Structures are given as C-alpha cells and as structure tokens.
Image (spheres, helix red, strand yellow):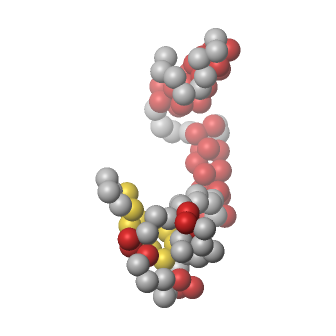
Amino acid sequence: APPLQGGAASLKGEVLELHVGHIDVALSAAAASPPDGVERETWRLDRVANRIAFDRTVAGLRSWAGDRFRGSEGLRSLLIVELPRRAAARAAAGGGAGTDA
C-alpha cells in the first residue's frame, strides 16, 4: 500500500508539470518498476531541496542582494524591502504572515 495508506512504499522522482487533477512526475532509475496501480493510489509528495537547487537559490539571492545587480530597482525593493516590511507589520498587528495587506 502507498505511504498514506500505511504502506512502506516510497519512490523518488522529479516533478515535471502541475495540472489541475494530477502531477506529472519523472521517476528515478531506482524506481523503474513502480508498484502496480501507482496511478490510482493516493501518494504523499515530499518536497526536498537538493544541492543544485540550493546552490542556484543562493546564487540568485546573492545576485539580487549584491552590488552588481542590474535588474529593476523597484522590483528589487519590493521583494527585498517592502514585502518583508509589510509581513512584519501584519505579524506585529496579529494578522499573521498569510493575510493580505
């Protein structure tokens, strides 16, 4: 049985595309023979960062925050200064980070 139904099965893969009713996933070579009925079962999708994704995120953040940034200063200010300031103000007011300004 799949993990959500008490089973011990787990598969590794990469999300290729999100759709309204399903998610396309490319399974790793180790999961070349998935269990029968895998398409009809309910599965938990764990999001795990890998080193490549982490390194790219760090590089992107350094680009945005660094002295050599060449993009829109307005967008940079919005993402790095304004949105965090608004989120902190909402949290301080008891509104939580998930509410709209």
* In this rendering, position of residue 53 left or right of residue 16: right
The answer to whether residue 91 is above or below residue 73 is above
The residue shown at (59%, 26%) is: 97
Tag count in the figure? 0
The N terminus, quarter of image: bottom right
Which residue of the protein is positioned furthest toward the top in this rendering?
Answer: 93
Residue 6, image quadrant? bottom right
The residue shown at (64%, 19%) is: 91
Position of residue 37 measured from the top left corner of the image (x, y, whole percent): 41, 78
Residue 56, image quadrant? bottom right
> Can residue 68 be spotted in the picture?
no
> Can residue 88 be spotted in the picture?
yes
The answer to whether residue 75 is above or below residue 20 is above
User: Which is nearer the eye, 29 or 51?
Assistant: 29
Position of residue 10 measured from the top left corner of the image (x, y, whole percent): 59, 74
Position of residue 50 measured from the top left corner of the image (x, y, whole percent): 64, 64
Position of residue 46 measured from the top left corner of the image (x, y, whole percent): 58, 60
The residue shown at (38%, 73%) is: 39
The residue shown at (53%, 79%) is: 28
Residue 98, image quadrant? top right
User: Which is nearer the eye, 81 or 35?
Assistant: 35
User: Which is nearer the eye, 53 or 3?
Assistant: 3
User: Which is nearer the eye, 56 or 31?
Assistant: 31
Which residue of the protein is positioned furthest toward the bottom in this rendering?
Answer: 33
The answer to whether residue 20 is above or below residue 25 is above
